[in-house]
Each structure stands twice: as C-alpha cells, then as structure tokens.
Amino acid sequence: MSINFKNFVKQVSVNNPNEPEFLQAVTEVVEDLIPFINEHRPDLIDQKILERMVEPERVVSFRVAWLDDKNEIQVNRGFRVQMNSAIGPYKGGLRFAPDVNLSILKFLAFEQVFKNSLTSLPIGGGKGGSNFDPKGKSDQEIMRFCQSFMTELQRHIGSETDVPAGDIGVGSREIGYLFGQYKRLQNNFSGVLTGKGVQWGGSYIRPEATGYGLLYFVQCVLDYHNDTMEGKTVSISGAGNVAYYAAEKAIQLGAKVITLSNSQGTIYDKEGFTLEKLHFIAGLGRDLGKYAKKYSSATYHAKENPWQFKCDIALPCATQNEISEADAKLLIKNGCKIVAEGANMPSTAEAIKVYIQHKILFGPGKAANAGGVAVSGLEMSQNAIGQQWSSEKVDHRLKLIMENIHKTCVRYGKDNNGFVNYLRGANIGGFIKVAEAMKAQGVV
Ligand code: NDP
Ligand code: 2IT
C-alpha cells in the first residue's frame, strides 16, 4: 500500500474548496512527506496520519461586534483554528488584517504544527485572528475591538489548552488589551497569551526573537557552508516586528542591509542601514518615503518590492506569496545565494521550484522563523514556574534552538551529493515527532 500524491492533493482540494493558501501549504509539505512515508514509514499509511493532519481538530468562528469612535456599530469575524494538539497545547499567533479568512488561517495553523515540533518544545499548532483592519484606528477602538474579540475567544483558550500570541497587526499593545480582558473575565492570571510585557509575565527577547532567530539560522547555514555574515549584502522586506529585528541583528553581525519595505513601497539605501538609521525608520510609522528625503544615499520605490536589488541574502519578512517566480529568477540573476523566510510562506510554489532548481540555500519559514514561537514556548515555561529569566539566558536558549533546527534540517534534508534541501529537512523533521505522538495516542 502507498499514498498517491496527486490523489491526496485532489482530495484535500475537494474537501477544502476556495482555500488556495491552505492547499498551497499542504501541497508544499506532502510533496516531501508522501515519498518519505511510502519509502520509510509505511506503518503511518493505514494510521491515516496525513489525512488526519490536514483536518483541523477544531475551528471556531465567531462574530466580533464593537463600537467605533463615532459610536457606530462595527462587525468583524473572529477565528481560532486549533489544528493539532498531539505534542502540546495549541500554540500560534493571532493576525488582525483585512484579508484574513479561513484559508489563510488554516495555512498558518498547518505550518505552525511543523514549526512548533521543530523547536523541540512541547507545543501543538494553532492560529487565529480577524478581518479587522487596525490601520487608521484609534487606540480606544483597538482596545474595544480586542475586548470584544477576547470576550468570545476566552472560552476556547487556556494556559494548558491553547496559547495565542501576536502576528501581523497584533503586537504588545494588542496582547495587553487581550490579556486584560481575559484576566477580567476568567479571574485568572496565567500564561494564556505570550508576547506579554516584561513587567507582567512576558519573556525578555520575545519581541526580538523571530528576527534574531532568523539571523541565527542564517548564521548556521553560512557556517555549515564555511562562510560568515561579515560583509554580506542583505535585502529584507517588511518593516514590522520581524523585519526590524532581523535588520538589527544582521547589522550587528556585520552585514550590509540595503532594503526594508511595507505594503506601500520599498526603501533602498545603497550604503546600508546603521542602527541609528533603523531607529529613525522605527519612528516613521508607515511613511517610508520620508527616509529617502533625510538620507541622500537612499531612494524610495513606491509600489515596488525589494527583490530587484542585488543582494547575497534575501530575507522576506512581510507576508505570504510576496516572492513570485519572476522575483525569484531576478534574485538569482543578481547573485543571491540564500533565501531565508522570516514571514510565513512568503515564497510562491513557483518561486520555490526556481530556488531548488538553482540550488539556492532556502530556509523555509517553518524552520527559519521558528525563533518567535520558540521564545513563546520559553515564556510559557517561565510562567508555569513563576520565574523570569535574564535576556542573556533566553537569547542563549534561542540560539541553541535555532542550531538544533538547522541540524534537524541537515539530518533529513541532505542529498547524496551533499546539497542540503532545507525544505525537505524541515518538513520531515517537523513531521516525525507529531506522527509518532498521534500514533501513540490512538484514533482521535
Ligand atoms: P507586523 O504587523 O509587525 O509587520 C508586518 C509588515 O509586513 C509591515 O511592514 C506590513 O506593511 C508588511 N505587510 C503586511 N501585509 C502586507 C502585504 N499584504 N503586502 C506587503 N507588505 C505587507 O507583522 P510581523 O512582523 O509580526 O509579521 C511579518 C511576517 O512574519 C508574517 O508573515 C508573520 O506571519 C510572520 N511571523 C511573525 C512572527 C512574530 O513573532 N511576530 C513569528 C513568525 C512569523 P504595512 O504596514 O504597509 O501593512
Ligand atoms: O507565525 C508564528 O510563529 C507566530 N506568529 C508566533 C507564534 C507564537 O505563538 O509566538
């Protein structure tokens, strides 16, 4: 008996109509897993492990009604996708963005299962959010929205059930409002959310963790290939949490970071950003054009992404499907050798085919951006034992986790000719632990 790839993907697409992102994420994973299972783990076939993994354990969808500053009623949709709890409580971020829908949250939750397993911490996978658009909203509106959202979500989560965190549009401010409402309704101060402020149960290094972890992972890739970060030209997309700390760490490690971007455009600084310039960008809000007015070494490119600029390393840190096939070809033509994903699924399926064909060292999000959820896992541990660890300790553990993820990718992704297919390594490495746990726990 064996699993047929085409039939499997066909069935997933029939079962999940109009969910292109979810289908894309599943296809990307099972392309590696099906040959592996057929060859090495036929015991998992009649256990229907893959069929079970593509079916969320639970999906909650709910109305979020709230009052805007004009006292008008606004209605949004809230979700929590509880994908897999075989190795621990559901864990994963909340995304607030106007394009949020079930397909996007199911793809993110599915990726999260493999990512969380790769961290080697006991955390299952989930994701949630709302089609609420935080842009242009007042602080009071954000608070009222978060309170209404949590009034429903609170009955589905808990420190040993499901522990949400931030993602696009959800940062420390939103986590604060969400936590305040949870505590008020449940009368319980617990580690139900991560990304909390360091004064009230948060972990040091959690804000920095995804970006720093991404660079620690890239350092491992370079080290494995007898190279270093020093003097490398790095192109980064996004200007949010992940992009900012990725840029900061890259600069600290001696790289030249030449781009940052948002949904409106890209700044390109041919001399590279300094920490001082980064600080200036952080204060700009979303008007990145102002940067080029202040620094003559820079240009602003409205409505363009960063992939046209020559770089050694590309770090997409904005959103899904931001690198097309044409972008991937352009990056390679300009000499790019490493693509490591700070964002979730920023490369289209066609772009990934181009990387593999050209033997680009490609660190997929589920491995490369796992530092964020890893430090969330460390935040859960600190909450459980009522302690707070120092920045140095958390940063050290983050580094060890990223090194371990790199090792796992090499173990399962190394071809006979020595080339490391990090995507295959991450897919198989993330899968095994979850599959074993599901098998051991019976038909559930
Ligand atoms: P933020 O909200 O802090 O920042 C998002 C950035 O990406 C902004 O600069 C935003 O620009 C840009 N962006 C968002 N949507 C689009 C779009 N449709 N087109 C172009 N640019 C866009 O989010 P994060 O930095 O937290 O998240 C970025 C990515 O990293 C996401 O894919 C997320 O899933 C992933 N990630 C985040 C982790 C975390 O710990 N926060 C952990 C692991 C992965 P604008 O302001 O103009 O919208
Ligand atoms: O995509 C991700 O890994 C996150 N947004 C972080 C999840 C978390 O629980 O910290």
Image: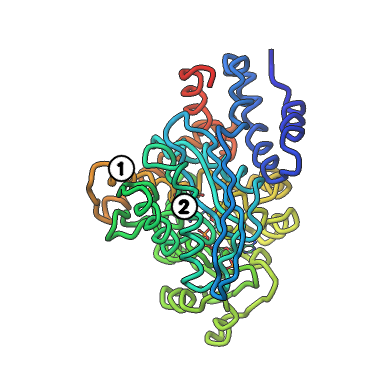
* Residue 153 in picture, x, y percent from top left: 48, 48
Question: Where is mark 1, residue-wise?
Answer: 381
Secondary structure under tag 1 reads: helix
Residue 315 visible to an observer of this rendering? no
Question: Going by the image, does 400 lie left or right of 52?
Answer: left
Question: Going by the image, does 244 lie left or right of 424?
Answer: left
Q: Is mark 2 within 8 Å of ligand 2?
A: no
Mark linked to residue 151: 2
Residue 19 visible to an observer of this rendering? yes
Mark linked to residue 303: none
- Distance (Cα) linking label 1 and label 2: 26 Å
Q: Nearer the viewer, residue 190 or 122?
A: 190
* Residue 68 in picture, x, y percent from top left: 55, 70
Q: Residue placed at 54% from the left, 67% from the top?
A: 67
* Residue 288 in picture, x, y percent from top left: 57, 77
Q: What is the total number of numbered labels drawn onto the structure image? A: 2
Above/below status of 54 relative to 281 = above
Above/below status of 428 relative to 206 = above
Q: Nearer the viewer, residue 138 or 213?
A: 138
- Placement of the N terminus among the 4 image quadrants: top right
Q: Residues within 10 Å of mark 2 (few under 14, many from 20)?
A: some
Amino acid type, mark 1: Ser
Q: Is mark 1 within 8 Å of ligand 2?
A: no
Amino acid type, mark 2: Thr
Question: Going by the image, does 22 lie left or right of 177?
Answer: right
* Residue 423 in picture, x, y percent from top left: 59, 40
Q: Residue placed at 32% from the left, 53% from the top?
A: 395
Q: Nearer the viewer, residue 88 or 57?
A: 57
